[in-house]
Image: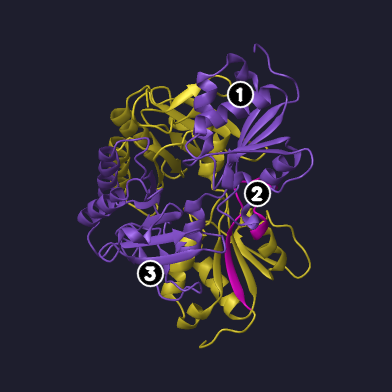
Chain colours: A yellow, B purple
Amino acid sequence: MNEVASGGWLRVVGLGPGSEALITPEVSAALAEATDVVGYVPYVERVAPRPGLVRHGSDNREEIRRAEAALQLAAAGHRVVVVSSGDPGVFAMAAALFEALEAGEPAWRALDIQVLPGISAMLAASARLGAPLGHDFCCINLSDNLKPRALIERRLRLAAEADFAMAFYNPRSKARPEGFERALGVLREACGPERLIMFARAVATPEETLRVTTLGEATPAMADMRTLVLVGSSQTRQIPCNTVGVPWVYTPRSALGSDA
Amino acid sequence: MNEVASGGWLRVVGLGPGSEALITPEVSAALAEATDVVGYVPYVERVAPRPGLVRHGSDNREEIRRAEAALQLAAAGHRVVVVSSGDPGVFAMAAALFEALEAGEPAWRALDIQVLPGISAMLAASARLGAPLGHDFCCINLSDNLKPRALIERRLRLAAEADFAMAFYNPRSKARPEGFERALGVLREACGPERLIMFARAVATPEETLRVTTLGEATPAMADMRTLVLVGSSQTRQIPCNTVGVPWVYTPRSALGSDA
C-alpha cells in the first residue's frame, strides 16, 4: 500500500482505571465517532457495543500485532480508537503504536494520529490514598517481560538513593512471582523496614481494595497484576483518618526540613 | 471548633492542563454541587460563575493558608472544591491540604475529604509528543522554593544513571533563572549532547507550543513557568511525521535490545 485512504484516523486513548466518571470527554467523543475499537479484550469490553462500531479484542502480549492491525484499518479509511486502561502513554499502547509505526509501511506516516491522555492508575491510586506522590517520584514497571531483572533492581536502588516516592506497575506475574519478593527485599535493604508501602488494587472499580503498611510488614501476596504499588519517600507521612478505611498518606511538598 | 457542621465536604480536584475536554466527569459533578471553589486565581477563573457558587481566588505561594481556609469552610458545612491545574497530587494542592489537615484543628479529621485525579501536564504533554514516558520514568519539580538546589542536581544525576525518561515541572522561575541553566548543564554532562529534550508549553490551550531538540541545542530560554520539560532515556527515539509540526517521540517498551 503506497497511500492511505481519506477519512481515516487513529486515536490511542486512555480509558482511565475503571470508572466511567474518570473517562475524559475528549476520549468519549473519539469513541462516539469511531468505526473500530482495538485493544486487549477486557478494555475493549469497557466500550459499549453500538451499530456501526466493530470491536476488535485481542490477547495480552499482542501489542505490536494489535498496533499494526489498527494502523492498517486507519490506512484503509477507518476511524480507529486503540484503547488502553489508565493512560495510553504509561506502560500501555502508545509506545507499541509508535514502534509499529516506525517499523511499518512508510504510507502510515501520513496518517492522522493522536494520543489522548487518560487518568493513569498511578494518579488514581494516589488520589484515593491522599497525596503520596506530592514530591519528586519515579514510576517503574516491575515486569521482567521486556527488561532484565538486574536493571529493575538497579533502578530500585538508584530511586531509593534519590529518595523518590515510587509507583510500581505490574508488580507480580503468575509466571514469575519471585520477582516481586526480590524487589521488596531490595527496597527493604535500601529504605529500611519502617518505610511506607501502599497496595491499591482495582482502583475505581467495585473490587477496589487499599492497604497501607510498611516494607517490614509487606508480603508479596499483597500484590497481584491488578495492583498498583506505591512506596513513600523518607518524608512520606500518614494521618489516621481517611474515610475510605485506611490512613491518609502524603508526601510533603518541602524537602527543607520541618521549619521550611 | 470541636465539631464539624453536617453536610460539608471537601474535594481536591484536578482541572487538567487547560482544555474543558480533559476535565473528568467526576470533577465536573463535584463542581456542579459545590458552594465554594478555592484556589490560585487563574485556576478558580476556569470555573464558570453561577448563582450559589462563591469563588475564592488567592495568590500563588499561599497554599497552606488556602488549604486552611478550605478546611474551615468545609467544617462550617460548605461543599468546597479546591482546584489545581493538571492533577492535584502532582506538585499541586493535595499535599498542601494534608499538611494543613495534619497540623490543624483535630475536628477537621472527621471531614468528608476526597482527592479527585486529573490529567497531569506530564501525561498531556507526553500524549501530544507521542509516548516519551513509555518506559520507566521520573518526575522532578525543578523549583528550589521548597528544596535545596543541591538535592535537585543530585536527583538529576541519579535519574540519568538509572536511565529514566524524565518529566520536569516548574523548570524556570523569574526570580532564579540560573537554576534551569545549571540543570541543563548537569543533564548534558550525565546524558550527553545527543539526548532528546522536549519543551511543551501551555499544552491543551490555544497558546500551546511544542519543541523537540537535543540537550546540546537546548537553551534555558526555551522554558518558562508554563513549560513542561521532558528528557528522553538513552532509548528514546523520534519519527519525523507528527501532524502537530514536531516529530513523534517515543520510548520503546523494551530494554532488552532491538531483537526483543
Position of A2 relative to A131 (above/below): below
The image's mark for residue B24 is 2
Magenta stretch, residue numbers:
A8-26
Q: Quadrant of residue A197?
A: top left
For label 2, the SS is loop
Q: Nearer the viewer, mark 3 or mark 1?
A: 3
Q: Nearer the viewer, mark 2 or mark 1?
A: 2
The Cα–Cα distance between marks 2 and 3, rounded to whole angstroms, is 31 Å
Around disc 3, counting alpha carbons within 10 Å, would you say few (fewer than 14), some (14 to 19), or many (20 or more)? Answer: some
For label 1, the SS is loop
Q: Are marks 2 and 3 in contact (CB under 8 Å)?
A: no
Q: Would you say B93 lies left or right of B144 here?
A: right
User: According to the image, label 3 marks what residue?
Assistant: B238
Q: Position of residue B227 (x, y in %)?
A: 43, 56
Q: Position of residue B259 (x, y in %)?
A: 33, 66
For label 3, the SS is strand
Q: Residue at x 26, y 53 (%)?
A: B187
The Cα–Cα distance between marks 3 and 1, rounded to whole angstroms, is 45 Å
Type of amino acid under label 3? Gln
Type of amino acid under label 1? Gly
Pointer 3 chain: B
Q: Residue at x 35, y 58 (%)?
A: B232
Residue B88 shown in magenta: no
